[in-house]
Each structure stands twice: as C-alpha cells, then as structure tokens.
Image: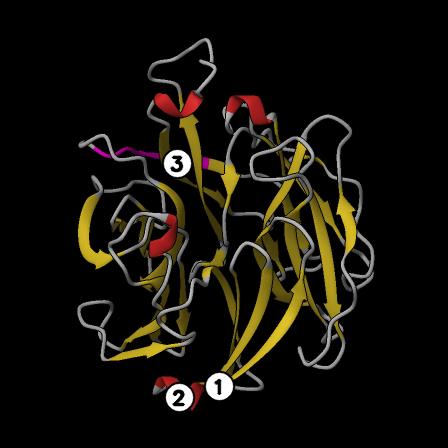
C-alpha cells in the first residue's frame, strides 16, 4: 500500500473525485473556496498527475460561478468522451436548489467544456458514481432533497429535517437520454443520501446509502427500474460518504466503519471485500491509521496495473492511497 499527498489546501477543501483519463494521466477534483460548505464561494479545482499519482500539479480552478457554489461528484470515464457531473447550489437553501449540469472533455481531460444542462432534462439531483450494467446501460444513483417542512427557509435551516431521498438515472443510449427511477425514502425519517451502486448479478443492483449511524440498502432486480423499501444494515457508517465497487467478481466497500455520527467519528477508513455477493466480508483492511480522521473516499480499480486507487480527505489535505489487488485478496 502506498500513500501520496495530492495537495494540502490553505483553506477548506472537500470531496476529492478521482479518475484515470484516456491518456493514462490521473485527475482529481476538489470542492474548495469559501470558509465552509455549503458556501456560495465554493468552486471546483483540478489537480493532475502524469506519473501514476507520485506527483501532482498545483490545483487550478476548473468550474466557478459568480453567485452560486459549484461542486462535482463524478467523473465518468467509461465512455468517449468522458464527462463530469457538475452541480450548482445556493448555500442559503442548503442544497434545495440543486442544478445538475454536464461537462465533456474532448482532449483526454486536459480541458473541459463549459457545463451545460443534460439534454434530456435530468436536473435537480446530485448525480453520484456511475456504473456500466451487464446490459450495457449506464446507471447513476442520485439523491435529491424533498421539503417536508420549513418551506420558507428558516434562518437556521438545519433545524428542519433535510428530506433526502434516493433514486437512479439509467441511460440505454450512451448518455443521450436518462430515465429517472425510484423514490427510495426511509420510513423511519432518516435522510438517505450519497448512494453508491454495484450490480451483483445480471439485473440485480444493490444501492447502499448514507444514513445516520449505519448504511442503508435497497435492491433492484430489473436493472435499476424498481427498488425495494430501504432497510438499515448493521454495517456502521460515521454519517459520511462511502464507495462501492465490483472488481473481478468481488464487492469492495470503502467506508468509515464507525457508528459515531459526529465529525470526530469519521475515522476507521477501511476497505472490506466480499466474495459471496455481500453476504459476508472476508477481508477487512485498514487503509489509513484508525485513530486519524480521513473520509469521503472516491475510488476506481485499475485492471491493468492490478491496483485500487482511493482518494480521501480530512477537510484540508487530499490523499491518494494505492492498494495492490493481492493485498485485498483479489487474484
């Protein structure tokens, strides 16, 4: 396992999003700018590595807006050209005014088009990490916010329960159109958000979602069209983002395995590996010192190098962790 600092920011910095580009370079996006998040001075910056992650360029502003925050959640590199899911929001509304955009690169990630609306009207959602299904379709889990009370945005908007619900956007034509499916809402009032998906078997898709102290799960058996009522798992989660991947038939869960829902609880960043479709987890590998706060993992598997690439952060530093497949029990 190898750890490399991507960048140490001078101010607040969040949610690294990591991918390899067609030319072999790596890019990492970060939310920064302003004293916190959400804040209307938030911008998206980009760093690049041309040596597999050993060294990184200084961050540059990639997307900004004069009056709204800009934040990116996914780089989809499973298509040509690759694209970024770009969002803006008004910080006063605490994500109630999410606007969803797309930006393409036609030169291997060196430059990116000005964000534009999805041509099919997909909007108002936070689009998360996409997967290619066995059918060839693309599936992107998303969350959105429902207003259940506090219509008039109280001065302290956090006194109202954020009504986060999840769903999936599926494209059958290579991204020309996306259909939205599912209203995955907790029956116990727990906000469900920042979902990730894996396809266990043909058509059988599992969505895991951030709850409060444990991950929630919903399942689809028709390629993401219909979803089961969500249920709480007994997998602890420190009220933060996790990542799911499928690598050579195994399921990888990268998560803060702590049931402490406070910011201080975002420790114990580990990779769990299942070889029996998530019934059990036979490998449980810490990837950062368990007593240190590192969270919001974003990852991809490099099949050629047989390495798992993970980006994580601590609100100021963004770190790259490279884990050989054999350390995860993957042949």
The residue where tag 1 is placed is: 1
The part of the chain drawn in magenta is 180-186
Q: Name the residue rendered at 42%, 76% in the picture.
A: 287
Based on the displayed image, in which of its 4 quarters is residue 269 positioned? bottom left
Q: CA distance from mark 1 to mark 2?
A: 8 Å
Distance between the Cα atoms at labels 3 and 2?
37 Å
Q: Nearer the viewer, residue 52 or 200?
A: 52
Q: Earlier in the sequence, mark 1 or mark 2?
A: 1
Q: Residues within 10 Å of mark 2 (few under 14, many from 20)?
A: few
Q: Position of residue 30 (x, y in %)?
A: 64, 53
Which residue is the site of mark 3? 181
Look at the image and say whether residue 237 sits in the magenta stretch.
no
Q: Give percent across and percent down for residue 136.
A: 49, 59
**Cα gap from disc 3 to disc 1, whole angstroms:** 39 Å
For residue 267, side relative to residue 30 (left or right): left
Give yes or no for residue 185 being in the magenta stretch.
yes
Q: Quadrant of the C terminus?
A: bottom left
Q: Say if mark 1 contacts mark 2, CB within 8 Å.
A: yes
Residue where numbered disc 2 is placed: 327
Task: Give the answer, above or below, for where 134 lies relative to 250.
Answer: above
């Amino acid at each position: 396992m190898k750890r490399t600092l991507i960048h140490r920011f001078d101010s607040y910095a969040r949610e690294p999003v990591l991918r390899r580009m067609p030319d072999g370079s790596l890019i990492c996006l970060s939310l920064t700018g302003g004293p916190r998040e959400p804040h209307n001075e938030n911008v998206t910056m980009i760093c690049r590595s041309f040596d597999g992650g050993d060294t990184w360029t200084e961050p540059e502003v990639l997307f900004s807006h004069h009056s709204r925050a800009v934040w990116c959640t996914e780089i989809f590199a499973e298509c040509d050209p690759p694209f970024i899911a770009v969002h803006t929001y008004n910080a006063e509304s605490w994500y109630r005014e999410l606007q969803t955009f797309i930006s393409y690169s036609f030169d291997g990630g060196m430059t990116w088009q000005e964000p534009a609306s999805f041509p099919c009207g997909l909007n108002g959602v936070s689009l998360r990490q996409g997967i290619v299904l066995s059918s060839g379709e693309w599936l992107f889990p998303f969350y959105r916010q429902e207003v259940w009370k506090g219509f008039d945005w109280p001065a302290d908007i956090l006194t109202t329960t954020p009504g986060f619900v999840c769903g999936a956007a599926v494209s059958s034509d290579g991204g020309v159109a996306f259909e939205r499916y599912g209203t995955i809402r907790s029956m116990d009032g727990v906000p469900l958000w920042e979902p990730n998906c894996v396809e266990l078997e043909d058509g059988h898709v599992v969505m895991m979602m951030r709850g409060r102290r444990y991950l929630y799960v919903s399942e689809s058996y028709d390629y993401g069209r219909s979803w089961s009522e969500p249920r709480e798992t007994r997998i602890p989660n420190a009220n933060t983002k996790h990542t799911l991947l499928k690598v050579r038939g195994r399921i990888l869960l990268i998560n803060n395995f702590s049931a402490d829902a406070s910011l201080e609880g975002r420790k114990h960043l580990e990779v769990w590996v299942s070889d029996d479709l998530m019934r059990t987890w036979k490998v449980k590998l810490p990837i950062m010192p368990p007593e240190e706060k590192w969270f919001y993992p974003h990852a991809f598997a490099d099949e050629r190098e047989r390495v798992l690439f993970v980006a994580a952060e601590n609100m100021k530093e963004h770190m790259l962790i490279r884990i050989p497949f054999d350390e995860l029990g993957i042949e």
